[in-house]
Amino acid sequence: MVTTSFESLRKALKNTRFFVAALSTNFIVIPALAGVIVKLLATHQPHVLLGLVMYFVTPCTDWFLSFTQQARGDKDLGLLLLPWNLFLQIMLLPLYIFLIVGEEITVKIGDFSYAFILFILLPFLLSRVARFLISIKDKPVSDSFFMNLQTISLTIVVLFMFALTGKEILMSASVFPGVLMSVGVFLIVMFFLSKAVARLAALNREEYVLLNFTASARNSPIALAIALGAFPDQPLTAAVIILAPLIELPILSLEAKLLRGKKSWLNSR
């Protein structure tokens, strides 16, 4: 579990230089890179492109902090960055889909709102209620239990979806190698691009480590929740989002081990 102090958060809040670098990378640089990758490497099936775009343009709001802490990065900055990442990705996602995928996919704001309320806001509120009820009985429960409630509910929905449309998804399995290749290329590019941005912004090592993981880790649970709610008749879009972490998580684990042992990594060539 990631912990910090109020004083550390207060100091981190003044780091405007880092926030400009991180938010610019997540919401300007990465969407542009996503557009290039999906056009060059992925299939031209609109709903496959949709899944990739939804995955690429939604920065992580949970496990990037764990990887940052493992690599001895600045977790205090990460905690302050998290709500900005969440708010901006929800607001900008329809725009990114329109700009990158084009008019082949109809984006309805009402469907996005429905998905956000049903799959994101409601589980969050239920977890708050459950935490309050348990606290009354003085029976402490690990924070990870509450963080996993949304994941568990999404998993049930995904399994149900595959049971109904598994044949259709398997018939499109030929596009999956391109999907995995696109994710792999994205992660490799972001590893080196994060280093370049960190140098340009004159970040220290701990800030660079955080920048690397907020720019590389993607928000699969949020992207999947919105895909299930806004595009329920397109299981291939959800399947693409589910596939992506199979490449992402092992690579981020390797990066955490590498950056943990490289105090001078930022200044190395």
Image (spheres, rainbow, N blue to C red):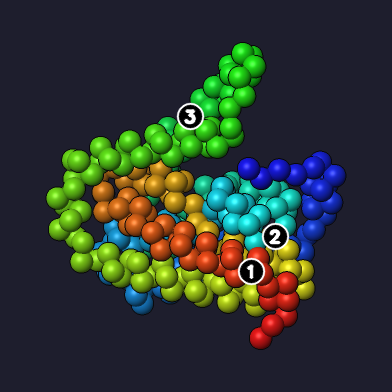
| Amino acid type shown at disc 3 | Leu
Give the vertical position of 156 relative to 38 (above or below): above
Tag 1 and tag 2, C-beta contact below 8 Å: yes
Would residue 209 appear left or right of 7 to someone viewing this image?
Answer: left
Ranked by sequence position, the earlier of labels 1 and 3 is 3
Ranked by sequence position, the earlier of labels 1 and 2 is 2
Q: Is residue 92 visible?
A: no
Q: Which mark is residue 259?
A: 1
Measure how far apart labels 1 and 3 are at the Cα level: 37 Å
Which quadrant would the C terminus be assigned to in this image? Answer: bottom right
Q: Quadrant of residue 161?
A: top left
- Residue 62 in percent (x, y) is at 56, 47
Give the vertical position of 70 relative to 183 (above or below): above
Would residue 54 appear left or right of 4 to someone viewing this image?
Answer: left
Tag 3 and tag 2, C-beta contact below 8 Å: no
Which quadrant would the N terminus be assigned to in this image? Answer: top right
Q: Which mark is residue 73?
A: 2
**Residue with the mark numbered 3:** 122
- Residue 101 in percent (x, y) is at 37, 63
